[in-house]
Structures are given as C-alpha cells and as structure tokens.
Image: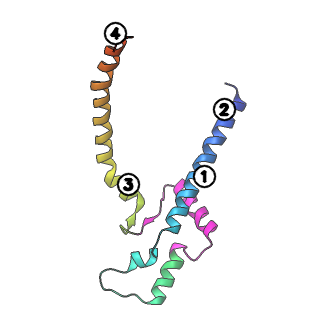
Amino acid sequence: MNLKRILGRLMQMVGTLIGVSFLTFCLTWLAPGDPVSMLLETADTVVSAELVEQTRHDLGLDQPFLVQYVHWAGGVLHGDMGMSYSAKKPVVDKLLEGFAGTLLLAIVTIIFVLVISLPLGIWSAVKRNKL
C-alpha cells in the first residue's frame, strides 16, 4: 500500500469516529429530562433555581450545542468522558465497573469459539462436499 492510500483510510477512520461521537452526543443531548435535575434532586429534595442555574453554568450546559460538543470531545481526548447524570459519578468509573464482567464474557466466548468452532471447521473440511 502506498502512503496516499494509508492516509486516505486513516482520514476515513477519523471521520467515522467523529461522526459516531457526534451522533452519540446528539442522542444524549436529546434525551428526555434535565441533567441538572437528575444530578441535584434526590428523593423529595427541592433545590433552588439559583443552584440549578449555577450547576448548569458549571457543567457548561448553558453553552450552545456545538460548544458543548467541542468541550466534551476535547475532554474525551484527554481521558475525561464527563459525568453520568443518572449514576452521579464519572463515566470512566461507570465503564470500569462493568469491565471485569465484559472481560470475563469475552474470554468465555473465545473459549467456546475455540472449543466448538475449531473442531466443527476441521470436521466440515474432512467431510467436504457431503451433507
């Protein structure tokens, strides 16, 4: 492969990554409910309008949509994926909670693939052109 083709593929990958991240950000932005209310209100607690506005400003939710996306994407590039409004904790921590289970599932899947698919593949190669 020449350098021009490699760079073209790299640009396609970067464009796809930006497009998917933008669509994902759009979906979270369009989700029903107010993130500030989810963060601040617990049980029957009512918070003041000043605190809601201050939190909205602190989180950057008072900025235009594209500014929010650029700040979020910049944070992701630096390892800060933001705050989970429903779990009230950083997204990275939430992802790490499920990492062990996901890793276990991947390992078990690989074992099953090797134990089942490999012998079946060999058997079908030996019994080629037969039922």
User: In the rendered structure, which disc, 2 or 3, sits on the residue that comes first in sequence?
Assistant: 2
For mark 4, what is the residue? 126
Disc 3 crowd, CA 10 A, few/some/many (<14, 14-19, 20+): few
Name the residue rendered at 52%, 58% in the picture: 24
Extent of the magenta region: 59-85
What numbered label is drawn on residue 6? 2
Name the residue rendered at 46%, 72% in the picture: 32
Instruction: Tell me the amino acid under the disc marked 4.
Output: Val
Report x, y in % for residue 20: 56, 52
Disc 4 and disc 2 in contact, CB within 8 angstroms: no
For mark 1, what is the residue? 19
Front position among marks 4 and 2:
4
User: In the rendered structure, which disc, 1 or 4, sits on the residue that comes first in sequence?
Assistant: 1
Disc 1 crowd, CA 10 A, few/some/many (<14, 14-19, 20+): few
For mark 3, what is the residue? 95
Front position among marks 2 and 1:
1
Vertical relation: 54 (above or below) 118: below
Name the residue rendered at 31%, 14% in the picture: 123
Disc 4 crowd, CA 10 A, few/some/many (<14, 14-19, 20+): few
Disc 2 crowd, CA 10 A, few/some/many (<14, 14-19, 20+): few
Q: Is residue 74 magenta?
A: yes
